[in-house]
Amino acid sequence: MPPESALPETTAAEAGSGSVGEGSAAREIAIQAAGLGKVYPIFRKPQDRLKQMICRGRRKYYDEYWALRGIDLTVRKGETIAVIGRNGSGKSTFLQLVCGTLTPSLGTIAVNGRIAALLELGAGFNPEFTGRENVYLAASVLGLTTAQIDERYASIAEFAGIGDFIEQPVKLYSSGMYARLAFAVAAHVDADILIVDEILAVGDAAFTQKCMRFIHKFRETGTLFFVSHDTSQVVSLCDRAVWLENGEVREIGPAKDVCYHYVADLHSERDTSNAFRIGGSRKTPAAAAVPVQDPRDEILKSSQHRNSIEIFEFNDESPWYGVQGARIVGVELLDPQGHILPSLDGGEEVVLKVTCRAEKDLFSPIIGFYIKDRIGQNLFGDNTFLSHANAPLAVAAGQEFAARFRFQMPYLPVGDFAVVAAIAEGTQHDHIQHHWVDDALFFRVHASHVSRGLVGIPMHDIALGIEEAC
Ligand SMILES: Nc1ncnc2c1ncn2[C@@H]1O[C@H](COP(=O)(O)OP(=O)(O)OP(=O)(O)O)[C@@H](O)[C@H]1O
C-alpha cells in the first residue's frame, strides 16, 4: 500500500473518524458518513515513489486515485444495509473506513457502538497463532475480558465446528475454516454493529445457513452492514442498499429497488457487449423432446402461454473467482440424448452439463450450479457432492471431466435467467473454490402461464371432481 504520508494533505476538520455525537436523535444513529472519501497515490514508475519520499511533498510525482468520494450516509440503529457494486467500485474501502482500519482522506465517518467486522480474509487473525489463541486475541480486541472469553470459548469452538484444527495455526486453514472461526468469534462478542464483507461466499452451505440464522437473529437488535455480490441475499436480508459505482454513490434506497436497477444495469451492459446475444449465434437444433408428464402439456404448447425458453451460448467472459486449480470450460443444456439445445419448453426433461479442465491433480472435485432469475434470486441449484461422496473422483492435471444434472425444467416466468456454475474440491463442509463463474449461461423465457411464484412445478396429474358424501 502506498505510504499514507504521500497522500494529499487534509485538515483535521476535513477528514476524521469518531462517535456520532450527543442528543436523542444522535443516539439513534449507528453510522454516519459525511463527504467521506479515500484517495490513493498512483505512481507511474517505481522510481517516482522514491522521488516522492526524497522531495518530501515539495513536488508531486503521483496521480491521485479516488477509491471512494463524496459518500453521505446515515445508518439508523437496527437497520440492515447492504453495499453493492461491481469489482473495484469501493465497497471494501467503505467498509474498512467504517471499521476504522482505513483513515479517510476527506470527510468524516462516525460510529456509535461496538463493531464486529467480518472482512474477507481479514478478521485480524495472526496466521502464526492457533485458532484458540486467535479466539482470545480477536475477542479481546473486540472488548471482551479474558474471563468472558473463558466463559464463551466452548460455544465459540462449537459454532466454528472445525474440530481439532482449532489447536493448529490458522495459516494452515482453508478459507472456509478461517471464515468459520472469524464468524464464530463475531457471533459471541455482543456487537452492536456487525459488518460482513463477502465472507459468506467462502463457507459451505451448512455453515452459511448457520451464519444466516445468526444474522437473522442479530438483525432483531443490531445494525448490520453487509457487502455482497449476491443480490438475492441482499434483497432477503437488507432494508436498504447503497449502490457504488467508481467510488461514488449511484443509488441509495430500498434494497429491492436498488438491486433490481443494479442487475438490470449489469444485464443491459451485457446486451451491448454481445455477451448476452439475443437471436445471436445459436447451437444446432434439438432432437426430439422427451415426453413430459404434465397433462396440460399439449394445451400449453399450442397456446400463447407456451413456456418456450431460448438458450444462449456459454459465456466464457463472465465474472469469476477462485484459485483456478480447475476451470469451467463449458456449460450447456442438452436433451436426454445428449444433443445441445438451442431452446426448450418448461416442463421438459433436460441435462445441464458443466465441463471442467483440471489444471492440477484433483481429488474429490465437486461441481455445482444455481439458476438465478434477473434480480439474482436463486431459484434452484445442486451439486455432485452427495451422489459421489462414497466414491470421489480423482482427476489428473490436464484432463477434462464433466457433471451432468438431469432434471425436469420447471415452468419459468417470463424474463431472463442465468446459470451460475462452480467447481470446488473437498467436502461439503470444507472445500477450496477453484472456479466460480457467475452468469455462465443465459436463457430467456418469452411467454409463460406462471404468474405467481418464482417457478411453476410440472404436475403429474390434476384432478377435479365431486367427493361423495359418506
Ligand atoms: N491501497 C490501494 N492503493 C491503490 N488503489 C487501491 C488501494 N486499495 C484499493 N484500491 C483501489 O480502489 C478501488 C476500490 O477498491 P475496493 O477494494 O474498495 O473495491 P470493491 O468494490 O470492494 O471491489 P471487489 O468487489 O473486487 O472486492 C479499486 O480500484 C482498487 O484497485
Image: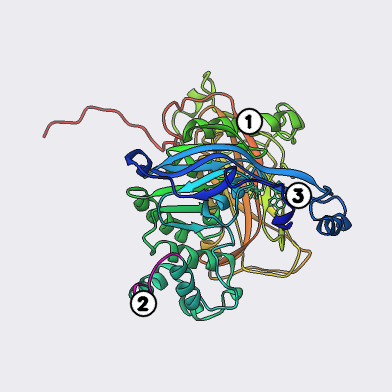
The amino acid type of the residue labelled 2 equals Asp
Earlier residue among tags 1 and 3 = 3
Residue 325 is covered by the magenta coloring: no
Pick whichever, 293 or 323, lies toward us. 323
Which residue is disc 3 drawn over? 41
Pick whichever, 389 or 73, lies toward us. 73
The amino acid type of the residue labelled 3 equals Pro
User: Within 10 Å of the Cα at label 2, are there few (<14), some (14-19), or many (20+) other Cα atoms?
Assistant: few
Whole-number angstrom distance, CA of label 2 to CA of label 1? 49 Å
Which residue is disc 2 drawn over? 150
Q: Is residue 8 above or below residue 346?
A: below
Q: Pinpoint residue 445: horizontal percent, then vertical percent.
A: 58, 29
Q: Pinpoint residue 86: horizontal percent, then vertical percent.
A: 64, 41
On residue 242, the disc is: none
Which segment is the magenta one? 142-148
Which residue is disc 1 drawn over? 265
